[in-house]
Amino acid sequence: MFASRNPHRIDSFPPVDEANDEGLLAIGGDLSADRLLLAYRSGIFPWFEEGFPVLWWSPDPRAIIELDELHVSRRLLRTYRRGPFRLTLDRAFDRVMRGCGEARVEGTWITESMIEAYGNLHRQGHAHSVEAWQDGELVGGIYGVSIGGFFAGESMFYRRRDASKVALVHLVGLLRQCGFGLFDVQILNEHTARFGAKEISRDEYLRRLRAAIERTAQLAEWPQLNRSSE
């Protein structure tokens, strides 16, 4: 595995087709910005628990949400259009990450080392958050990693009903407006499936990833984004 080769190298990972049936590719290394960006560019992401070495994953198949095929229920669409939440971009990145970690009673991979590492990516412009506020309180949000026209959604949380879902709908609108080409949600589960996530082969994912990261795109707030048109 990665750790037994040379944990300090950041110029390569093992070929992704060496991942096991669960998608585990490598063990070890650090969470430096260079290593994280190399991982995402290679179709790999970290996922591990506190007290364990960093685990690097490249599952096959891979789950994505097509930006023009987001499934939004009529009730959620009404909530989004009604606007009970004030939605912002990159106003409280660390707080969103901590909210995502605290929201999981079964345990979390959002460790202090992950918060520090992704906070560093955020300061470099490669990690972003969408926040949902109500009465001045942060009540939900979502965060992820961007490279060119690629965005990897990492996690979301809510403290008020629908807050994280509205943040997700808003994020997809921003990704479309800003010219992104691939929205990665990594693994298909019941929650992502409700929003229209689907699985594609790792080979197709890597092909689309290469094309997306070559795009010139920058996630930014669009004041003119019309909620009624989402």
Image (tube, helix red, strand yellow):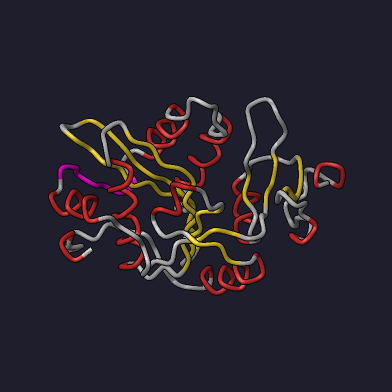
What is the x, y in percent for residue 34? 63, 51
Q: Is residue 36 left or right of residue 173?
A: right
Farthest-out residue, left = 82
Q: Nearer the viewer, residue 125 or 136?
A: 136
* Residues shaded magenta: 84-90
What is the x, y in percent for residue 108? 54, 31
Q: In this view, does 83 lie to the left or right of 55?
A: left
Q: Is residue 86 left or right of residue 37?
A: left
Q: Nearer the viewer, residue 173 or 78?
A: 78
Residue at the (26%, 36%) spot, across then down: 161
Asked whether 116 falls inside the magenta stretch, the response is: no
What is the x, y in percent for residue 157? 38, 37
Residue at the (47%, 73%) spot, across then down: 215
Q: Which of 85 and 64 is in front in this view?
A: 64
Q: Quadrant of the C terminus?
A: bottom left
Q: Quadrant of residue 111?
A: top right
